[in-house]
Amino acid sequence: MGYLYNMPSSEGWAIGLAVLFTLMAFNEFSRSTKWGGLAIFLVLPIFLTIFVWPTTAAPGNEYGTGNWFNWVKTYSALAGVLGFMAIRFIPGLVKNKWALAFPAAILAINIFEACFRDFQVYSYGAWDGEVINHLWLMSGSWNIMNGIAGLLNIIAICGWAGIVISKDKSKDMIWPDMIWPWIIAYDLWNFAYTYNCIPDHSFYAGFVLLFACTIPAFLIKKGAWLQHRASTLALWIMFIMTIPTFASHIAPVPTTHNPNAFFIVSLVALLANIALVAYQFNKIRKHKFNPLKDEIYKETKAYQNAIAENV
């Protein structure tokens, strides 16, 4: 990690772990009770939008939270959470093919927003690194590589027609065809995006935040990665929009600003997503799947485990 970041002290690691477990705890609370989810992701954001964010995330503020991307990402993440709650708790929606297209669509939109941001950072021409809109950024080939990696990740989204609702009390949105190859490729791409576009905030917004949704997807509620991702992302963005000094002043973990680190992180993300698309397209060709209708990974153990535990 010392290659990527100027490593935090033991106190810094403790703060990172506290953020991780807090995100996971609120995710568990919001998914286990419908009213808890509505309180956190509907009532609270309305209050913050009216009374808090116009000050803490004002356009052009010194903390970097007042740019278009932060505002768009906040509401697109919240739209995802609330849309998924509708699918989970409104009878009949899970049987509607248009409703089931929503999770794939909002996921693709969120990835595309980030790809656009990577290309935008490249367009700044900050080849030696400079502060732009109160964020330190360094433009380079890594922005192009990772933007392409994100577009490939969108292409590889599949199997949403097989989304089901778990039979337990929490009524989680289970996407069994979204198995570990796609999740890992996404995580590598998203970490590279945060490293490229919010580098000195990426320890929390990338490294910690991705663990906050990936751990539950593998160890707590299998098949519900997208639901975990949307909730933890919305929680983090709401927090950082409310307390914008956290990652920059209260508990900063800056990157090393090493161009080689930027290049390697994005190269790994690009190679992982090329491999994912090549593997997936080979399965589609071999089995004559329709990626807009068919589930691709039904024969895998990961898919079967998700079905067995939830249906």
Image: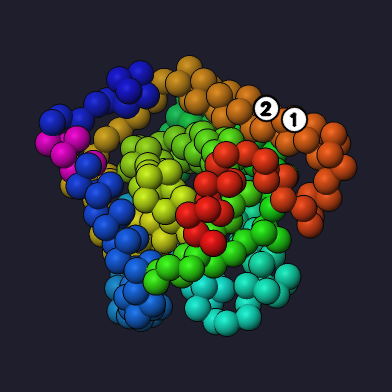
Choose top left, top right, bottom left or bottom right for residue 101. Answer: bottom right
State the residue lying farthest toward the front.
308
Dot 2: element: helix
Choose top left, top right, bottom left or bottom right for residue 94. Answer: bottom right
Q: Which residue type does callout 2 highlight?
A: Ala
Choose top left, top right, bottom left or bottom right for residue 132. Answer: top left
- Above or below, 119 relative to 54: above
Q: Nearer the viewer, residue 76 or 214?
A: 214
Neighbourhood count class around disc 1 (C-alpha, 10 Å): few under 14, some 14–19, many 20 upward: some
Residue at coordinates 67% horizontally, 46% vertically from top-left? 298
Residue at coordinates 58% horizontally, 35% vertically from top-left? 181
Q: Percent x, y for residue 25?
A: 27, 58
Residue 4 at least partly seen: yes
On screen, residue 163 versus residue 134, left or right, reads right
Q: Percent x, y for residue 115?
A: 61, 45
Q: Which residue type does callout 1 highlight?
A: Ala
Q: Nearer the viewer, residue 15 or 289?
A: 289
Per the rendering, the mark at residue 275 is 2
Q: Percent x, y for residue 135?
A: 40, 43
Residue at coordinates 84% horizontally, 39% vertically from top-left? 287
Q: Which residue is mark 1?
A: 278
- Above or below, 84 relative to 227: below
- Above or below, 70 relative to 128: below
Instruction: State the extent of the magenta-drawn residues as a range.
Output: 11-16
